[in-house]
Amino acid sequence: MKERGQIGRQHNGLSAAEGREPDATSGAIAARRSTSRTQEIDRHVGARVRERRIMLGLTQQQLADLIGVTYQQAHKYERGINRVSAGRLFEIAQVLSVPVSYFFDGLEQENERVISPRERMCLELARNFAQIPNERHQEALSQLARVLATVD
C-alpha cells in the first residue's frame, strides 16, 4: 500500500523521495530555453532554404509554385515564422536539389551569425549568374572568374 501512495505522488508531480512538488520556475526556464532553441532551428532551416533558393536564381513565388504553397507561406518558411513539416522539407529539398541534411548544416556552430557583406555579394553573384539565359555567356563569365582568381 505504501508503494501505491508513492506512485500516486509521482503522478501528481510530487517527488516520491521528498514528498514535495518540484520547483515550477526551473521547469518554466527549461521550457523557454527549449522553445527558444526550437525557434532558432526554424530560423536556421528557413535561412538555408532562402540561401539555396537565391543560389538557384529562384524567386519566392517560383519556389512557392514548385512546392505547392502560397508566396506568403514560402516567405514565412524562410523567415522561420512557420515551421516546415518533415514532408514539406523533403519536397523543398527535392526542388532545390539538395539532401534534407543541407538545411541543418552549420546548426551546431551557429550563434545568430550575421551574413557578411562578402557572403551577401557571393549569394547575389550566384543568383545573377543563374539568371543569365545564354549558356555561352555563363561559361565566359565562369572563365573570367577563374582567370581573375589566379591573378596575384
Image (tube, helix red, strand yellow):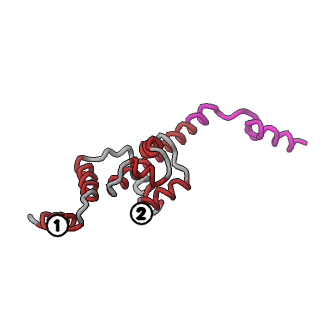
Q: Which residue is mark 1?
A: 140
Q: Nearer the viewer, residue 97 or 83?
A: 97
**Label 1 vs label 2: CA separation?**
25 Å
Magenta residues?
A: 1-29
Q: Which mark is residue 97?
A: 2
Label 2: state its secondary structure.
Answer: loop
The residue depicted at 17 percent of the width and 63 percent of the height is: 141
Q: Quadrant of residue 128?
A: bottom left
Q: Nearer the viewer, residue 48 or 87?
A: 87
The residue depicted at 17 percent of the width and 68 percent of the height is: 143
Q: In the shown orientation, is residue 25 left or right of residue 45?
A: right
Q: Is residue 108 above or below residue 23?
A: below
Q: Nearer the viewer, residue 112 or 28?
A: 112
Label 1: state its secondary structure.
Answer: helix
The residue depicted at 77 percent of the width and 40 percent of the height is: 11
Residue 46: x and y, percent? 43, 48
Q: Nearer the viewer, residue 58 or 89?
A: 58
The residue depicted at 28 percent of the width and 59 percent of the height is: 130
Of marks 1 and 2, which one's residue comes earlier in the chain?
A: 2
Q: Mark 2 packing: few (<14 Cα in 10 Å), some, or many (20+)?
A: few
Q: In the picture, which quadrant includes the C terminus? A: bottom left
Q: Amino acid at mark 1?
A: Ala
Total number of numbered discs in the rendering: 2
Asked if the magenta segment contains residue 20, the reply would be yes
Residue 134: x and y, percent? 23, 63
